[in-house]
Amino acid sequence: MNDRIGFIGLGNMGKPMAENLVKAGYEVTVYDLQLEPVADLVALGAKSAATPRAVAEQSDIIASVVMNNRQTLEVFLEGDGTGVLAGAAPGSLIVIHSTVSPALCQQVADAAALKGVGVIDAAVSGAAAKSKAGTLTIMVGGEDALVARCQPLFDVVGEHIFHMGGLGMGQAAKICNNLVSLVNIHVIEEAISLASAAGISEDKFRVLAGVSSGDSWMLRNLDQMRDLAALTAKGPIDMRIFGRKDISLAVKYAQAIDCDLPITSFVFDRAKL
């Protein structure tokens, strides 16, 4: 546990991950725009920092779990000198846990290389319950030596760790995994609407589908997904747009590597209506 850990982003996924690292005995410095989760981590024994740069100045490995490409760029490359790379020392390591594009990982890595800082991506799956339990699935992309350096941390926060290949391949795997689940939830909601229109109650349909070929992880966790949508909705919950960011990542990644995804494109276009 010689590596000091910086953790940026203390939301539903990030906060339990950081808590598990503190409980495992790591020296952890945290940052989030919200003060409450920071205070909770400090109460457990973590240190707080005022900026991502300050996190990096006190850390050997700096992990992020923020919302999207834009926030990830702000955290690591902020031009006003408050970003991680402004404070990261040569030999330190960035771990991108957020679900972002593979190209974004490379952009961060190119900037980090100029300072002698390594980068790997380590997308996580399993929702808040598995984050709390320390049983996440982690999909990793990056050089073997850098991934091996983080293995002890992954063992604390995850149960299933997959090294998928070079930088960005963890994100590619996460995008594919999310594509399966998010398209599925759109279909589930439409099946429920169709069943209701036909006179079949939602409860009865969900029991039926759960013991037949319509069963899936998303069906079994539909209420949890609806609760998550309610937390993130800026207005009335509309499950048609749930997961649009990740479906968009799949569409854009497919275009970048010249892969045709007609069903995904259809769902993405439908969700914009």
Image (cartoon, rainbow, N blue to C red):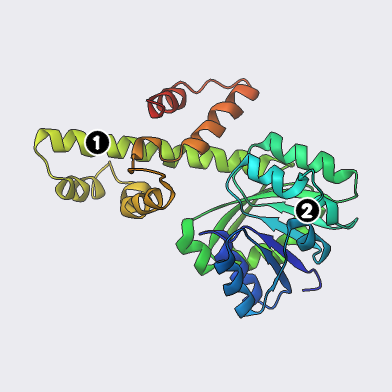
Residue at 36% across / 47% down in the picture? 218
**Of the pair 134 and 29, the residue shown nearer to us:** 29
Please tell me whether mark 2 sits on a helix, a strand or a loop: helix
Q: Residue furthest front?
A: 80
Above or below, comparing residue 1 to residue 94 in the picture: below
Residue 191: image tag = 1
Contact check, label 2 and label 1, Cβ < 8 Å: no
Tell me which amino acid carries mark 2. Answer: Val
The outermost residue toward the left is 199
Three-letter residue code for mark 1: Ala
Mark 2 vs 1, N-terminal side? 2
Q: Which mark is residue 126?
A: none
Q: Residue at x 46, y 23 (%)?
A: 265
Looking at the figure, which quarter contains the N terminus? bottom right
Per the image, label 1 sits on a secondary structure element best described as helix
Q: Is residue 169 left or right of residue 13?
A: right
Give the residue drawn at x 51%, y 37%. 245
Q: Is residue 87 left or right of residue 266?
A: right
Q: Position of residue 81 (x, y in %)?
A: 82, 49
What label does residue 84 carry, if any? Answer: 2
Q: For the point 58% across and 22% down, which residue is it? A: 259
Q: Position of residue 150 (x, y in %)?
A: 74, 60
Image coordinates for residue 238, horizontal then vertical, percent: 34, 39
The answer to whether residue 38 is above or below residue 172 is below
Q: Residues within 10 Å of mark 1 (few under 14, many from 20)?
A: some
Residue 14: x, y in percent? 58, 60
